[in-house]
Amino acid sequence: MRWRVWWRGVWPTRTSATTRQPQVGTPSSPLLDVTNATVVRGLVRALDGVTFSVNHGEHTAILGPNGAGKSSLIRLLALDDYPIAAGDPVPRVRWFGRDRWNVGELRRRLGIVSGEFDAGFAWASRRGRVSGLDAVTAGFFASHALFAHHVVTDSMRRDAADALSRVESASLGVKMLSEMSAGERRRVLIARALVTRPEALLLDEPTTGLDLVARHRFMESVRRLARDGATVVLVTHHADEIIPEIRRVLLLGRGRLVRDGSPEETLTGESLGALYGAPVSVKRTAGYYAVRVDPPSG
């Protein structure tokens, strides 16, 4: 079933980036601005009037259980759904102060890493017969692989090699995607997202399918990138993916934002128990949060 997006009673269609003049913000504009976003799937409101903004350098996590509306939110943030409110001048989703983008241009400023994208990436990339370096270089063209019509410069190759080094994966440049482990392939994808040196990273359930060690290494890579200046926006249902550098957490439940605050304020047994509908205990260790469901009493 396709997702349908509804804005104040209007069923829009997706249009090109040239449909109307982009609204460009000032240097003081938020990195991300979402205003009264409502998404309807069938007869169900997957998102209901969601409003929030993220400033530059404000590492933020959006946490919610399955069915909370995270997939709908990600599709909006990644511009897979591109709604237009006919007759309503207020844009619903803005990145870097703009509500209309050529996707290739946006990808140079916003890197996206998704466990779902990883699941099909190797197969789509010539059934995995693509080297790590080529997969990262293809990020300049928003493509799964390099093709004859792509003009690849020496500078692009150097930047791709540097991106792999930034996630401590230089050795993966010569390895084929089809020969990599899930953790190795995920590090290649984050290098691909970094190759254009974006200002922000949008992470969608980024450790899905990774084992304990691969998950830890991946999130440590994200920590380094956050410290290096890339603003991290993480959408997840795993509290243990929330790195210590993230100092703001939004709780999403049944399509609505139900809490917005620091990790200390939001990642509590009371708040998460209400969000997930079960009694839970929360433990904090070295800046990370671990959540477990409490056994039934008696």
Image (cartoon, grey):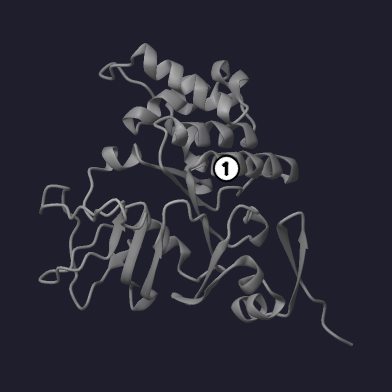
Q: What percent of the width, then of the height, locates residue 296?
A: 82, 82
Q: What percent of the width, then of the height, locates residue 75?
A: 37, 57
Residue 192: tell me if it is visible: yes
Q: What percent of the width, then of the height, locates residue 253?
A: 51, 75
Q: Out of 257 and 188, give the one closest to the viewer.
A: 257
Whether residue 173 is situated above or below residue 96 in the rendered picture = above
Which residue is at a point 31% across and 57% down the rendered structure image?
Answer: 29
Q: Out of 117 and 199, give the one closest to the viewer.
A: 199
Quarter of the picture containing the N terminus is bottom left
Q: Which residue occupies the extreme front position in the image?
A: 28
Which residue is at a point 45% across and 26% down the rendered structure image?
Answer: 135
Whether residue 73 is situated above or below residue 101 in the rendered picture = below
Residue 130: tell me if it is visible: no
Left or right: 290 as drawn, with respect to 298: left
Left or right: 51 as drawn, with respect to 206: left
Q: Out of 175 and 52, give the one closest to the viewer.
A: 52
Left or right: 156 as drawn, with respect to 14: right
Check disc 1 and report the residue beneath it. 227
Q: Give the quarter of the image for residue 156.
A: top left
Q: Out of 4 and 75, give the one closest to the viewer.
A: 75
Amino acid on which the number 1 mark rests in the picture: Arg
Which residue is at a point 28% across and 37% down the rendered structure image?
Answer: 104
Q: Give the quarter of the image for residue 49.
A: bottom left
Crowd rating for badge 1 (residues with CA inside 10 Å; few <14, some 14–19, many 20+): few
Q: Which residue occupies the extreme right position in the image?
A: 298
Which residue is at a point 89% across and 87% down the rendered structure image?
Answer: 298
- Count of marks placed on residues: 1
- Dot 1: element: helix
Q: Which residue occupies the extreme top position in the image?
A: 154
Whether residue 114 is situated above or below residue 294 in the rendered picture = above
